[in-house]
Image: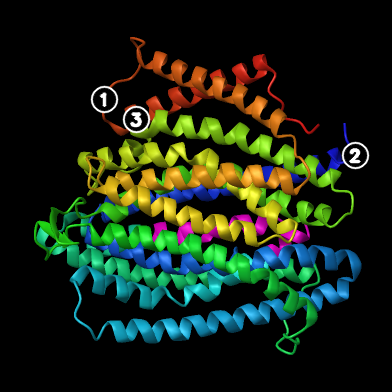
């Protein structure tokens, strides 16, 4: 066993902590989305709230967990080793800088949104603007929480940052259930229901800000314990901050391209969705075509994305978060043997979890969707569309999981240009694939197919480039293990299909039946995959 094995056990143990807390958050997230589906369904209100809530999350990924954080963590990790006092000043200056940027974004954004309300627009678009106006200040809180969580992660304190999303989910669930009862939404007529749903969505938007304040407050005691002190007097324009900004520019552009892709996807979906006041056909490029998507497409795609993001948060993102500070420290050494060994181990673990997650979600999609969403305002027709989109999103899990590790490896080596260039390729591939497919029988699921194509291309190209840049990470050995994992996935799929043919396999559409099906398929698939990997000698430990 290599000398880096203790470090390997360290980040794996941290990943387990993050995974456990993320699992709790995702379970509550499932409950939240189930409640949303029950009381809002796939309609104009859920579409509008979903689009509006994407805005603060976009900036979280762009700044809080993106550009500044990706550049800050490697520099802060090195500063902690060399001069803890200087590291503290660097952290305080970085937080002040982030706060100034976010305040500016919020102020400018509110002015733009106010101006937008003065122009004629579709009712559903106006609703998006109103919800966004309320939730835009959440940018300050969610980005601050993510960045402050990065400080704690360098100090090997991963629990609280991973627990922070739990608060948001709890508040979401509480507001929706309590508000629905106060408004007597379940008893409302179809004509009155939309107005009540809009009122409830306004309440929910307001409480998003309450959750943001609570998330930041929760981190403060731990930050104080590791020596961080917030100070308005901290000088911002220092050499470490300048270096961080220099490194963060390509990361920001890369993250901006990725988030632009998300916005483009959402914008295309809204544009191609038949609205309450539109005709039956859309006119573009001199052609008259039927609208390829029905109302609720944004919400349905969001629920499909939620399903594939569930295993991502529990496994891939947790592992990448835990390994990043160690990779950043190892990459600074002249001898990068530890860096390559840790990276190789991280890639193996990612694929070991990513491949079965892709196949497994495809297998269990129907019972999972019926159990979580198909009740109240969520219809069986919605289930069919969400299930179709889930097939393509699920098939991309392994690729997106791999990107989490690879991006952090590039950032650890202070290479921020390669992810930027590949992000540009991703958005081009995504758009070129998804728009034509949206006009086929795939409809809204064509958007998910574009995501699959772009993620797969980016992951494979990044891996090949990183192998060359790092001086060889053992791609042949990784590919050999990956082949064994795929064989195990095939066995898992056949085992799950076989169990559905047994005479005592539960049948029906009731929630209890869906729960039974889900448990049977998960146990069968997990056992088949694990046993096959064991028999094939798949490597999981570090070389």
Q: Front-most of 381 and 507?
A: 381
Image quadrant in which the N terminus is located: top right
Image quadrant in which the C terminus is located: top right
> Which residue is located at x 56 percent, y 63 percent?
254
Q: Write down the residue under mark 1.
A: 508
> In the image, which disc is placed on residue 3?
2
Magenta segment: 149-174
Tell me where residue 132 sits by quadrant: bottom left
The percent coordinates of residue 278 (x first, y second) are: 12, 64
Answer left or right for 285 relative to 55: left
| Label 2 Cα neighbours within 10 Å, binned few <14 / some 14-19 / many ≥20 | few
The percent coordinates of residue 411 (x first, y second) are: 69, 58
Q: Is residue 86 above or below residue 32?
A: below
Q: Front-most of 386 and 522?
A: 386
* Mark with earlier residue (1, 2): 2
Judging from the image, what secondary structure is the residue with disc 3 in?
helix
Q: Front-most of 379 and 179?
A: 379
Judging from the image, what secondary structure is the residue with disc 1 in?
loop
Q: Is residue 222 covered in magenta?
A: no
> In the image, which disc is placed on residue 210?
none
> Which residue is located at x 47 percent, y 62 percent?
259
For marks 1 and 3, give the CA distance. 8 Å
The percent coordinates of residue 244 (x first, y second) are: 72, 73
């Amino acid at each position: 066993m290599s000398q880096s094995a203790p470090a390997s056990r360290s980040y794996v143990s941290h990943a387990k902590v993050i995974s456990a807390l993320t699992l709790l958050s995702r379970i509550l997230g499932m409950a939240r989305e189930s409640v949303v589906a029950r009381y809002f369904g796939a309609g104009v209100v859920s579409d509008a709230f979903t689009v509006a809530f994407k805005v603060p999350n976009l900036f979280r990924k762009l700044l809080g967990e993106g550009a500044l954080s990706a550049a800050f963590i490697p520099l802060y990790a090195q500063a902690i080793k060399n001069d803890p006092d200087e590291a503290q000043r660097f952290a305080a200056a970085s937080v002040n800088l982030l706060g100034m940027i976010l305040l500016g974004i919020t102020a400018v954004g509110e002015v733009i949104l106010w101006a937008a309300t003065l122009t004629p627009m579709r009712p559903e678009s106006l609703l998006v603007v109103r919800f966004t106006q309320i939730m835009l200040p959440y940018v300050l809180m969610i980005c601050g929480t993510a960045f402050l969580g990065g400080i704690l992660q360098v100090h090997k304190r991963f629990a609280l940052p991973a627990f922070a999303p739990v608060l948001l989910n709890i508040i979401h669930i509480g507001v929706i259930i309590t508000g629905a009862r106060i408004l007597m939404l379940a008893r409302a007529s179809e004509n009155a229901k939309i107005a009540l749903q809009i009122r409830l969505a306004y309440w929910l938007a307001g409480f998003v800000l309450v959750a943001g304040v609570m998330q930041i407050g929760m981190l403060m005691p731990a930050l104080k314990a590791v020596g961080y002190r917030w100070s308005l007097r901290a000088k911002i324009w220092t050499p470490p901050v300048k270096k961080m900004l220099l490194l963060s520019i390509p990361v920001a552009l890369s993250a901006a391209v990725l988030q632009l892709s998300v916005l483009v996807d959402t914008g295309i979906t809204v544009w191609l969705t038949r609205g309450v006041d539109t005709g039956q056909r859309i006119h573009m490029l001199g052609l008259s075509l039927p609208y390829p998507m029905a109302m609720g497409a944004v919400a349905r795609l969001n629920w499909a994305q939620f399903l594939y993001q569930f295993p991502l948060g529990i496994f891939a993102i947790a592992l990448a978060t835990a390994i990043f500070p160690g990779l950043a420290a190892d990459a600074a050494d002249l001898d990068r043997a530890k860096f390559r060994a840790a990276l190789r181990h991280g890639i193996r673990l990612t694929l070991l979890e990513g491949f079965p997650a892709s196949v497994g979600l495809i297998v269990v999609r129907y019972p999972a969707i019926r159990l979580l969403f198909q009740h109240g305002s969520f219809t069986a027709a919605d289930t069919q569309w969400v299930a179709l989109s889930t097939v393509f999103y699920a098939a991309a899990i392994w690729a997106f999981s791999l990107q989490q590790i690879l991006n952090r490896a590039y950032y650890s080596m202070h290479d921020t240009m390669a992810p930027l260039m590949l992000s540009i390729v991703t958005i081009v591939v995504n758009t070129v694939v998804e728009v034509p497919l949206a006009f086929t029988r795939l409809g809204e699921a064509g958007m998910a197919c574009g995501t699959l194509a772009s993620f797969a291309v980016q992951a494979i190209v990044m891996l090949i480039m990183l192998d060359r840049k790092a001086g060889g990470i053992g791609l042949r050995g990784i590919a050999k293990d990956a082949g064994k994992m795929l064989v195990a996935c095939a066995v898992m799929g056949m085992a799950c299909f076989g169990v559905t043919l047994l005479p005592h396999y539960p049948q029906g559409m009731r929630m209890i039946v869906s729960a039974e099906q889900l448990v049977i398929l998960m146990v069968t698939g997990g056992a088949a995959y694990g046993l096959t990997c064991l028999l094939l000698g798949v490597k999981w430990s570090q070389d």
